[in-house]
Image (tube, grey):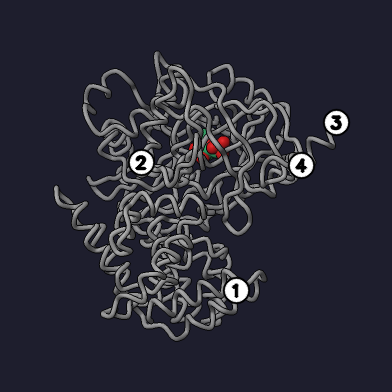
Amino acid sequence: MLFNEFSEICEEIENTSGRLDSIEIVSECLGELSKEELPVFVRFLMGRIFPDYSPEKTGIGPNLVYEAVAYVAGKNKNSVIKKINTGGDAGRAIENILSKKEQTSFFTQSLDLLEVYNDFLYISEVGGNRSQKEKLKVLRRLFANAKPKEARYISRLMLGELRIGIGEGNVRDAVAKAFSVSPDSVEHAYQASNDLGEVAIIAKKGESALAEVKIELFRPVKMMLAKQGSISEIVEEEGSVAAEFKYDGTRFQFHKKGGECRIYSRKLEDVTEAIPDVAKMLLSSTQENVILDGEVIAVDNGRPLPFQYVLRRFRRKHDIAGHMESLKLVPNVFDIIYINGETLIDTPFSKRREILDTNVKDFVAPQIVSGDTDYIESFYRSALDNGHEGIMVKSLSAHYTPGIRGKDWIKIKPAVDTIDLAVTGAEWGEGKRAHMFGSFLLACRDERGGLIPVSKVATGISDDMLAELYSLLKESVISESGNSVRFEPELVFEVGYSEIQKSPNYDAGYALRFPRFIRLRDDKAIDEIETLASIEERFSVQSAKK
Ligand code: AMP
């Protein structure tokens, strides 16, 4: 497939509002692709270059893209950035800038989908001192050969924002339709393999091939997520339920085969080197080959320390031994999704727990099973007394559903309203904070995956945190105008608020009253932030209470 055809399809989807129409467009193309093209096409459509489980990253920042575009367009970088600032949409701005190039270049070569992918792969692999130069060389060649519309999508892929408005669920349904298999089997295979691209190839072989897809060691799967709710609701629905402490730490997935192990963070990054103490503890806790799910907390004299402490250890690249001494981490294992070649995601939770209890001897999180709300309430109070965040109440019959935030896991914590939002912009600080960002623009997600501003936050951020945020965000600036900057959305903030109000000031149509920074959620990815629909739901629940 030519990259030009891919771009045309993206544009068609971008201009289509109906879900079914988008699925139709995609499913029609899928049947015609080769075995090599199929996974690349599927991942590209979802705005991804590599599989979700893969550690590969292109490492292309906005700066490098703008530099390459400026070179190819024969302009200076600042004028390119200025054009992007005025347009707001980097992809379209780059398309525009490069459309002037077309008349002057005679030797353009048609880009092929696989060739573009191989260039990305090459970029992700080049390391060493000359890596930036080498990456830039490839980007220049890509933009030099790209037609303006192709440049729109190439740059968006590089920046991680395809913005064509086709969600993961729709691509899954298109795969099912194209190969006449059920969306549920595609979903299940995707949950186990964590790469819809590869699942598309398997779907072509039919339903039974999909059913064969299993979880593999050292290929992390997405983590199951929880919803807010109440003890009485879930007890009413389920009768007896399991309840565990809700640990205020960082999620991990532990993979072990013989004496070898790896630990993955919630974003599925390999963090084993940063926490060798935890790896050692878990390795010695079982003889079996397993994948365990749990939460690491930091402890001081047996009491849990706040979440930020753990993150400091997870992010660490240097002086790991020194930090191991000063900050003690403890894993708490609450689930098992693989044992000795067997995938357990379709096994009910009560059975998984039994397998966990039988095969893992240490660090298994305590659990109660009860249908008595008073008893669960008292367990909740003891969780808070022991310094935990609250409790998790879980359906005993539920399967493990990777990446799904369903009502099989309910989180119960004290009633501070908090919300996770993406940081999409900032304003420079004032006075002694003038060299850092002072206030941050926050956005929720819409159902098409777009980011919609809903609040600003400036209170509750310590000077140390402001400095940390500046160092984390300074490389992510896409554009700057006046006192404001826009970021490549990468960071998630958890923000407290007193109320959600209707507001014309933000595109979401809502705003947070008294927003206050609670913490940086750099364990969360952008696609895990709150959706506009759930903000609407919070608003109506709040109105009903009034
Ligand atoms: P939240 O991050 O507020 O959506 O709450 C869900 C998170 O709580 C999970 O992703 C885990 O990181 C964490 N957690 C802590 N304790 C547990 C537990 N016992 N079971 C499941 N998740 C837990």
| Quarter placement of the N terminus | bottom left
Is 75 on the left or on the right of 391, as rendered? left
Give the foreground label among 2 and 3.
2
Q: Is residue 288 above or below residue 382?
A: below
Which of the 4 quarters of the picture holds residue 270? Answer: top left
Label 2 residue SS: helix
**Which residue position holds label 1?**
22
Write down the residue under mark 3.
546
Residue 338 disc label: none
Dot 2 alpha-carbon crowd within 10 angstroms: few under 14, some 14 to 19, many 20 or more? few
Q: Which residue is mark 2?
A: 475
Looking at the rendered structure, the secondary structure element under dot 4 is: helix
Distance between mark 1 and mark 3 Cα atoms: 41 Å
In the rendered structure, the answer to whether residue 400 lies left or right of residue 153 reads: right
**Above-or-below relation of 258 to 138:** above
Please, what is the three-letter code of the amino acid marked with disc 4? Glu
* Between 319 and 496, the one nearer to me in the picture: 496
Secondary element at tag 3: loop
Task: Look at 37% across and 59% down and name the residue there.
Answer: 158
Callout 2: CB less than 8 Å from ligand 1: no
- Of 266 and 146, which appears nearest the observer? 146
Q: Which residue is mark 4?
A: 236
As drawn, is 391 to the left or to the right of 135? right
Q: Quadrant of the C terminus?
A: top right
Instruction: Name the residue: 37% across, 83% down.
Output: 34
Q: CA distance from mark 2 to mark 3?
A: 44 Å
Q: CA distance from mark 4 to mark 1?
A: 39 Å
Report crowding for label 1: few under 14, some 14 to 19, many 20 or more residues within 10 A (C-alpha): many
Which label's residue is closer to the chain start, 4 or 2? 4
Q: Quadrant of residue 243?
A: top right
